[in-house]
């Protein structure tokens, strides 16, 4: 079986990606389960690149037909999932920004009304966020 | 009982002053949360007698309500009322809204614009019904006007509210909280004032779709 230059490029990139996954895991920036997931994804990419017939076998199993079509469908699904995760992450960041803005607003109010019997607890929104997080409200899939 | 009204406001200089002046008679304190307005809303609200809490930047309705409720709780409120700044609510309705709470018959109240035919435009009526249906489908609690901005809570109820959304979806999130916490909810019929201005301040079609999308995501992520 002859190999094409594109396969070498893909394999080189897979090697780079796997090495990054492993190094991030060693640095403690990636937990075990995501590390296994990413490593499996890149290794599968390498296998499909070297042995395209594997994708055809997979396509037949799931009833798609051509292997390249199955790869495209999986890639599109993966992209949508990535987009969803990014949306959730952006929403989390937006809410964190809100908590900072709220804390500043309440602190400013407390400063303006020192004669008030009870000053607003400017740190309360941050504590509330920590509580929400501990209850899993801000779970990222 | 100490009654504090929270008015979230974003670029409402046309109406916020009159809204605050109308509320003074019915509240011990009016807190206007200026949500990063770029017009004179904050100054006009303060001049009208409100206690103004200002967000450095616009964060949305849910964020402003959360800030206002925190400020009201710190202000030793016994009853917290939320009231729109666009002039669509009548201050007189506040007294009717809080009556069941002050009597100990309810923990929360919502001012329903739909219990009677109040001249609500058909488009707005339809949008409200969709909001109610979506809220009920996602969170299991049906109310007659889930998107109403006129609400009231006892202190104990407000302290337990867990609001995590920053934008328009907070209206449905509040209904979710009513159901989750098992709060006794009173639905009080109110008569809204529809003007071209107040109608222009409502959620448009695109914003409504975005709100619906965020609510669905919220429900998916909810444990």
Image (cartoon, coloured by chain):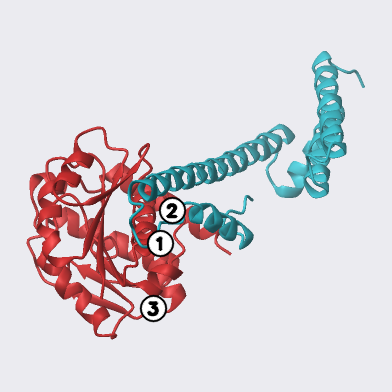
Chain colours: A cyan, B red
Vertical placement of B21 versus A101: above or below? below
User: What's the CA distance linking mark 2 and mark 1?
Assistant: 7 Å
Task: Quadrant for residue A130, please give it.
Answer: bottom right
Task: Quadrant for residue A82, please give it.
Answer: top right
**Numbered badge on residue B165:** 2
Q: Earlier in the sequence, mark 2 or mark 3?
A: 2
Q: Is residue A108 left or right of residue A81?
A: left
Q: Which residue is mark 3?
A: B183
**Numbered badge on residue B173:** 1
Q: Is label 2 in contact with label 3 (beta carbons under 8 Å)? A: no
Q: Secondary structure at mark 3?
A: loop
Q: Chain of mark 3?
A: B
Marks 2 & 3 on one chain: yes
Q: Earlier in the sequence, mark 2 or mark 1?
A: 2
User: Can you give x and y, in whole percent of width and height, for residue A47 in the image?
Assistant: 86, 33
User: Can you give x and y, in whole percent of width and height, for residue A114 in the image?
Assistant: 36, 52
Vertical placement of B3 versus A55: above or below? below
Q: Residues within 10 Å of mark 2 (few under 14, many from 20)?
A: many
Q: Is label 2 in contact with label 1 (beta carbons under 8 Å)? A: yes
User: Can you give x and y, in whole percent of width and height, for residue A108 in the image?
Assistant: 38, 44
User: What's the CA distance linking mark 2 and mark 3?
Assistant: 20 Å
Q: Chain of mark 2?
A: B
Q: Secondary structure at mark 1?
A: helix
């Amino acid at each position: 079986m002859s190999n094409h230059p594109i396969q070498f490029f893909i394999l080189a990139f897979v090697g780079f990606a796997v090495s990054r996954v492993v190094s991030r895991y060693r640095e403690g920036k990636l937990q075990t389960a995501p590390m296994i997931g990413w490593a499996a994804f890149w290794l599968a990419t390498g296998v499909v690149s070297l042995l395209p017939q594997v994708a055809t076998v997979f396509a037949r199993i799931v009833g798609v037909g051509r292997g390249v079509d199955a790869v495209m469908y999986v890639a599109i699904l993966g992209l949508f999932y990535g987009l969803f995760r990014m949306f959730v992450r952006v929403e989390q960041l937006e809410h964190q920004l809100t908590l900072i803005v709220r804390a500043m607003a309440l602190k400013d109010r407390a400063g303006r009304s020192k004669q008030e019997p009870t000053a607003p607890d400017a740190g309360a929104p941050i504590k509330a966020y920590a509580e929400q997080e501990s209850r899993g409200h801000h779970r990222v899939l | 009982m100490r009654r504090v009204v929270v008015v979230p406001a974003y670029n409402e200089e046309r109406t916020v002053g009159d809204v605050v002046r109308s509320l003074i008679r019915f509240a011990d304190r009016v807190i206007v949360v200026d949500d990063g307005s770029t017009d004179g809303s904050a100054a006009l609200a303060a001049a009208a007698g409100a206690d103004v809490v200002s967000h450095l930047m616009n964060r949305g309705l849910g964020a402003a309500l959360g800030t206002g409720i925190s400020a009201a709780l710190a202000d030793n409120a016994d009853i917290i009322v939320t009231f729109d700044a666009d002039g669509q609510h009548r201050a007189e309705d506040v007294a009717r809204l809080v009556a069941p709470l002050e009597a100990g018959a309810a923990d929360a109240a919502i001012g329903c614009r739909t219990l009677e035919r109040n001249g609500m435009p058909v488009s707005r009526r339809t949008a409200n019904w969709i909001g109610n249906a979506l809220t009920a489908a996602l969170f299991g609690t049906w109310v007659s006007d889930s998107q109403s901005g006129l609400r009231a809570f006892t202190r104990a109820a407000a302290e337990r509210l867990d609001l995590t959304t920053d934008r328009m979806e907070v209206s449905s999130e509040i209904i979710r909280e009513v159901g989750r916490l098992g709060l006794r909810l009173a639905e009080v019929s109110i008569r809204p004032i529809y003007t071209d201005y107040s109608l222009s301040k409502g959620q448009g079609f695109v914003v409504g779709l975005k709100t619906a999308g965020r609510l669905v995501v919220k429900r998916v992520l909810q444990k």
